[in-house]
Image: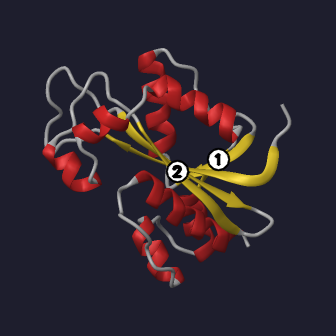
């Protein structure tokens, strides 16, 4: 399949998490897929979306809610399955044909683990940009930094709620627009 290079699909996932040890029988699952579209011609983000996902093998802990603002009630009311989310990524965002990016490798690895654990086809193509590494390389850093620090270094205000997927994806898209320009 030919690559579509007009846009970069920026992804940020939020997953179930706990303070300290993971409860027995549970594992970290994606509970939000944040999406931002970086238009390469305009060199700016043009769209963002949050897809909430109901976890199957874990519960949203108070720590997770405090970090992400995502509650079990939100997921019960508005969440869909990871299968449905992957179908949306493939159909509506052409995720198999687009270059996609995330801040670090966590999101790529979490998607691979979650899809494998649930027997779901991986929704993305092979071209993944690690925006965290790209930022460090472009800025001449000797080690990678967090998204909030990168925004501050570029003089870009953090928009939205940090650790909400759609807001983080939007902010990462703004960083990518700067370093790819």
Q: Residue at x 43, y 73 (%)?
A: 158
Q: Residue at x 48, y 14 (%)?
A: 119
Q: Is residue 37 visible?
A: yes
Give the x, y percent position of residue 108.
52, 40
Task: Specify the farthest residue to the front.
Answer: 77
Task: Specify the farthest residue to the bottom.
Answer: 155
Q: Based on the displayed image, in which of its 4 quarters is residue 161 positioned? A: bottom left
Task: Give SS at disc 2.
Answer: strand
Q: Is residue 151 left or right of residue 37?
A: left
Give the x, y percent position of residue 53.
39, 34
Observer-nearest residue: 170 or 99?
170
Q: Is residue 125 visible?
A: no
Observer-nearest residue: 140 or 132?
132
Task: Give SS at disc 1.
Answer: strand
Question: Is residue 84 depicted above or below 47 in this figure?
Answer: above
Along the polypeptide, which appears first: circle 1 or circle 2? 2
Q: Based on the displayed image, in which of its 4 quarters is residue 177 positioned? A: bottom right
Q: Residue at x 27, y 22 (%)?
A: 57
Question: Is residue 64 depicted above or below 133 in this figure?
Answer: above
Give the x, y percent position of residue 29.
34, 32
Checking the image for residue 49, the label placed there is: 2
Q: Is residue 133 left or right of residue 98?
A: left
Question: Is residue 87 depicted above or below 153 in this figure?
Answer: above
Q: Is residue 109 left or right of residue 22?
A: right
Q: Is residue 87 left or right of residue 15?
A: right
Give the x, y percent position of residue 66.
19, 54
């Amino acid at each position: 399949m030919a690559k579509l290079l007009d846009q970069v699909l920026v992804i940020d996932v939020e997953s179930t998490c706990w303070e300290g040890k993971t409860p027995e029988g549970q594992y970290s699952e994606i509970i939000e897929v944040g999406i931002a579209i970086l238009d390469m011609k305009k060199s700016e983000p043009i769209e963002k979306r949050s897809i909430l996902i109901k976890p199957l093998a874990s519960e949203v802990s108070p720590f997770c809610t405090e970090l992400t603002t995502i509650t079990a009630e939100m997921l019960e009311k508005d969440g869909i399955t990871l299968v449905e989310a992957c179908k949306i990524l493939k159909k509506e965002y052409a995720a198999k044909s687009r270059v996609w990016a995330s801040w670090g490798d966590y999101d790529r690895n979490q998607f691979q683990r979650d899809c494998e654990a649930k027997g779901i086809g991986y929704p993305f193509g092979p071209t993944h940009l690690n925006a965290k590494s790209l930022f460090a390389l472009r800025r001449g850093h000797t080690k990678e930094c967090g998204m909030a620090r990168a925004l501050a270094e570029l003089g870009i205000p953090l928009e939205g709620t940090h650790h909400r997927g759609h807001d983080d994806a939007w902010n990462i898209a703004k960083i990518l627009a700067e370093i790819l320009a």
